[in-house]
Image: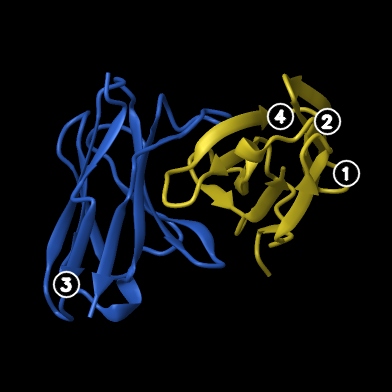
Chain colours: A yellow, B blue
Amino acid sequence: QKEVEQNSGPLSVPEGAIASLNCTYSDRGSQSFFWYRQYSGKSPELIMSIYSNGDKEDGRFTAQLNKASQYVSLLIRDSQPSDSATYLCAATGGLGNDMRFGAGTRLTVKP
Amino acid sequence: NAGVTQTPKFQVLKTGQSMTLQCAQDMNHNSMYWYRQDPGMGLRLIYYSASEGTTDKGEVPNGYNVSRLNKREFSLRLESAAPSQTSVYFCASSVSPALGETQYFGPGTRLLVL
């Protein structure tokens, strides 16, 4: 069983819509969670980090964490074509320096 | 301030050849990491170095060795390349290995083993 799972997509939304990306994790010891964005042929770049249950907002991005359900999500409001990328969910395995990544969800925002 | 740099950007090897991937960071970070990324598999940790002078195995260390040359540099060596090691390799660094520390990634090295 993969430790961090994401819907592989592709997810396609129209410009201006809300994109919802989901992630589940199996290690209950995970304490820190991250969303990275990766454009094709580029390296991952951090969008959001979240450590506590609830919502965390940063501009058009909102991360949601539910530790009881072992579920993390990323909402992108007012989606733009420039948001088209693969989004990687990551969680620390509880060991402090062993981050586990999901396989990523490819998002396409259509003009 | 270049962040995390990697060389080479692209390499083609024949089975059995050896090579070293270089990584350097100029952010004064203590911790450094090597990942490989394969289609449908996400990023998988090969080795990490929590601080200068220490290295530890990650999820997929077989076939690789690493050296933390100094605080700035962390190299990954393939002693005898195999086609299964065809992948994109990313180096990353963070301030420390503590929970919640952001990892910053280099541009990647694309390796093809024939």
Is disc 3 in the same subunit as disc 4? no
Q: Say which chain tag 1 marks.
A: A
Name the residue located 16 percent from the left edge and 72 percent from the top edge. Answer: B13
Crowding at label 4, few (<14), some or many (≥20) Cα neighbours within 10 Å? some
Query: How far across and down, in percent of the image, does residue A108 sit?
Result: 68, 50
How far apart are the alpha carbons under marks 3 and 4? Answer: 42 Å
Classify mark 1: helix, strand or loop: loop
The reply to whether dot 2 and dot 1 touch (C-beta < 8 Å) is yes
From the viewer's perspective, tell me whether residue B50 is left or right of residue A109.
Answer: left
Q: Quadrant of residue B32?
A: top left
Residue B29 higher or lower than A87, as above or below = above
Residue A101 higher or lower than B18, as above or below = above
User: What numbered label is drawn on residue B13?
Assistant: 3
Crowding at label 3, few (<14), some or many (≥20) Cα neighbours within 10 Å? some
Q: Say which chain tag 4 marks.
A: A
**Type of amino acid under label 1:** Ala
Disc 3 versus disc 1: nearer the observer: 3
The reply to whether dot 3 and dot 1 touch (C-beta < 8 Å) is no
